[in-house]
Image (cartoon, helix red, strand yellow):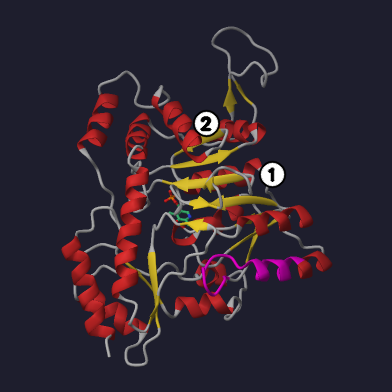
Amino acid sequence: MIPYGKQDISQADIDAVVRVLQSDFLTQGPVVPLFEDALAQYSGAKHAVAVNSATSALHLACLALQVGEGDIVWTTPITFVASANCALYCGAKVDFVDIDSKTYNMSVSALEAKLESASLLGRLPKVVIPVHLCGQSCEMAEIWRLSKMYGFKVIEDASHAVGGRYKDFSIGGGQYSDITIFSFHPVKIITTAEGGVAVTNNEELAVKMQLLRSHGITRDPKLIRATDGPWYYEQIALGFNYRMTELQAALGLSQLSRLDEFVSKRHALAAVYDQSLAALPLELPYQHADCYSAYHLYVVRVKSKRISHEECFLKLRESGVGVNLHYIPVYKQPFYQAMGFPMGYCPEAECYYKEAISLPIYFGLEVSEQRKIISTLLSLLGE
Ligand SMILES: *Cc1c(COP(=O)(O)O)cnc(C)c1O
């Protein structure tokens, strides 16, 4: 089966991890800060806080922005459940803004309309979490403008989008948000096996996230009350063990040096799909003029009268093409259904869900494999 996504591990990656294994520190050593600095530099952010997953980074970002009981967080229904769960971890409520019919990202007009009515009801969100689906940025300038109008904070879930750009900026630069989250799960653009990073230009937020990733414990003389001696530390908040290991950071640092190459290859693969599938009854990924996608996913929407979405999906799998569907609208999950979201809550998202298929796209996808994927689609959907 050709998977929909896959990591690419070089000898240099392996050597970097082995060097850490032979060193004094497997965790809390010098490599995590090196990885953080490199990622901050790459994305143009002042601070980077590495943790053990993007899910943890989302949780810490919500806590740093003081999301708690009585608060509401909004995100998109077309995302991985973690983008919504992070608010629930903090005791807040979650709500969903429908997607744009072209980009499949959070719709700015739906957001604006929902803010207007929420404002009248006194139910404005504390934080909005736009997700850069497939690696293409949301329309962040507009979302940022609305955040200033309505007084909410913005966390970009850029789990798909490291290496992507928006307007003149690398994703994560923080021009239009408070905190940006990256994921380094193996299917994403670069990997640390498990791992995530939060980047921000706000030092106070960075310090809070650093504190909370390690039990709320600090030795920083600026933060502690007093000292009893050189052994002394204080727990000043209820934190977690969300630390990234040195092994993960070494892998990430090594992978980061190939990030641009990874993204270029994804663009080349996308261009081949664009050209080869143009005549088929498929809606191909729309690229917004302000965006340079990281192309984590290549999503097509099945618009055929002859073959259903499900049959197309099934036939592709039967032919050895490991397609996937990103995503089931989050509020359709049983856990969220129990919160009372009705069917049809976000019509564009539900329409998307009935048609979307993610085709394989990753650095190591061979020409012959992509040819096979294309010929399978041509035979299934061609006239
Ligand atoms: C993968 C993913 C996450 C979670 O990332 P982990 O590093 O696996 O915790 C969150 N949001 C989105 C949109 C993702 O794709």
Mark 1 belongs to which amino acid? Gln
Q: Which residue, as the protein is rendered here, is positioned at the far left?
A: 368
Which residue is drawn at the image coordinates 58% and 81% (left, top)?
344
Q: Is-magenta flag for residue 108?
A: yes
User: Dividing the picture into quarters, in which one does residue 266 lie?
Assistant: bottom left
* Disc on the earlier residue, 1 or 2: 1
Given residues 282 and 125, the one toward you in this image is 282
Q: Residue 41: which disc?
A: none
Residue 379 coordinates in the image, percent (x, y): 22, 83
How far across and down, in percent of the image, does residue 219 sit?
A: 58, 18
Q: Which mark is residue 214?
A: 2
Q: Position of residue 271 (x, y in %)?
A: 33, 64
For image coordinates 27% across by 91% down, the residue present is 383
Of residues 164 and 207, the one drawn nearer to the viewer in this rendering: 164
Q: What element carries label 2?
A: loop
Q: Magenta stretch: residue 366 in it?
A: no
- What residue lies at 29% left-to-right and 56% top-to-bottom? 362
Residue at 38% from the left image edge and 32% from the top image edge: 245
What element does badge 1 sit on?
Answer: loop
In the image, what residue type sits under mark 2?
Answer: Ser
Instruction: In this rendered view, identify the residue nearer to me: 259 or 97.
Output: 259
Residue 312 relative to residue 53: left or right: left
Q: What stretch is highlighted in magenta?
A: 99-115
Look at the picture and state if 183 lies above or below 270: above
Classify the position of the N terminus by image quarter: bottom left
**Which quadrant of the figure has residue 117?**
bottom right
Question: Would residue 158 be seen by someone viewing this image from the given angle?
Answer: no
Mark 2 closeness class: few <14, some 14–19, many ≥20 residues within 10 Å: some
Would residue 293 be visible to someone looking at this image?
Answer: yes
Give the Cα separation between the discs numbered 1 and 2: 18 Å
Residue 66's disc number: 1
